[in-house]
């Protein structure tokens, strides 16, 4: 279990994360959502100890996490937005370098490298250098590298950024399999469809503060699960309804300029961001 208590990070006069409280359960697929500058990456950076909190603390299984807590840090692996791998290394070399950093026995390192590359479908490409891999392959290799040390918690900061639609769906399937091994996953993403498809719960943060916390289905139900999009002189407007019959009645009077659909997590995000909730 991850407990985030009164977590605050300031950079001079700017508060990036503002007294954030969250509990993430063991084995949960948890999403951190918010607009640019909301504090998502800063929160992930503090969870990985790249940044230290100004106030508050993060506890893993009841033990406070800091840079000296090596046992706690070994429970974590992080996948960042950037491709943090040397371009002239092959996949095998990337994995070996990671294994040596964590003092894995050579035999264990090789066996786990074989297992992980096979798991993500990269075995036949293992002798390619990083510079000759596609974006999707690089992301998969980063996951292999992160899983090599058998972490209990995987922190993912925009893991599908820049991927095409097919590669993104392949990554979703891979992350579902990883989470199916009872690994806790914390995800930041700008793709609301991704969060809706993958996450057990999501936290919407804005200006470093927690705004909403629930399952994707719960947030959608709160807004209204039925949506009517209507084209007006000022642009496309969406109305949300809790009752299907009310939505259909509104659609009937709106005429051909309107359409009916299911509400999505993206609607929740847009509505919250549009109201600039505090």
Image: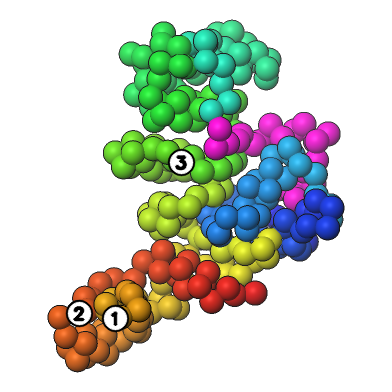
Q: Is residue 159 above or below residue 116?
A: below
Q: Are marks 1 and 2 in contact (CB under 8 Å)?
A: yes
Q: Residue at x 52, y 10 (%)?
A: 88
Q: Which residue is mark 2?
A: 257
* Secondary structure under the numbered disc 1 in the rendered image: strand
Residue 62 shows in the view? no
Residue 137's label in the rendered image is none
Q: Are marks 3 and 2 in contact (CB under 8 Å)?
A: no
Which scheme is used to colour this image of the protein?
rainbow
Q: Are marks 1 and 3 in contact (CB under 8 Å)?
A: no
Local crowd at mark 2 within 10 Å, few (<14), some, or many (≥20)? few
Q: Residue at x 77, y 58 (%)?
A: 15
Residue, far front:
233
Q: Quadrant of the C terminus?
A: bottom right
Q: Quadrant of residue 177?
A: top left
Expressed as whole percent of the image width and height from the top left, the position of residue 236 reads: 32, 74
Spatial CA distance of label 1 from label 2 is 8 Å
148 relative position to 237: left or right: right
Q: Which residue is mark 1?
A: 232
Spatial CA distance of label 3 from label 2 is 34 Å
Q: Which residues are magenta?
A: 56-82
* Secondary structure under the numbered disc 3 in the rendered image: loop
Residue, far left:
256
């Amino acid at each position: 279990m991850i407990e985030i208590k009164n977590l605050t990070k300031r950079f001079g006069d700017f508060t990036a994360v503002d007294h954030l409280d969250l509990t993430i359960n063991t084995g949960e697929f948890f999403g951190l959502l918010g607009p640019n500058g909301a504090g998502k990456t800063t929160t992930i950076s503090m969870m990985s100890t790249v940044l230290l909190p100004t106030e508050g603390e993060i506890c893993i299984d009841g033990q406070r996490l800091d840079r000296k807590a090596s046992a706690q840090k070994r429970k974590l692996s992080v996948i960042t937005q950037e491709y943090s791998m040397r371009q002239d290394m092959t996949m095998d070399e990337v994995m070996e370098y990671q294994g040596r950093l964590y003092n894995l026995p050579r035999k264990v390192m090789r066996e786990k490298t074989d297992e992980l590359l096979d798991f993500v479908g990269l075995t036949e490409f293992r002798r390619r250098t990083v510079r000759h891999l596609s974006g999707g392959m690089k992301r998969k290799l980063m996951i292999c590298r992160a899983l090599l040390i058998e972490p209990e918690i995987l922190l993912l900061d925009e893991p599908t950024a820049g991927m095409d639609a097919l590669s993104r769906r392949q990554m979703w399937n891979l992350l579902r399999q990883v989470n199916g091994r009872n690994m806790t996953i914390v995800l930041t993403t700008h793709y609301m469809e991704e969060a809706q498809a993958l996450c057990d719960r999501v936290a919407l943060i804005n200006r470093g503060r927690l705004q909403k916390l629930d399952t994707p289905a719960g947030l959608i139900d709160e807004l209204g699960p039925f949506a009517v999009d209507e084209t007006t002189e000022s642009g496309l407007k969406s109305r949300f309804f809790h009752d299907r019959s009310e939505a259909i009645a509104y659609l009937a009077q709106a005429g051909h300029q309107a359409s009916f659909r299911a509400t999505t997590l993206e609607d929740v995000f847009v509505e919250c961001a549009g109201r600039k909730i505090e």
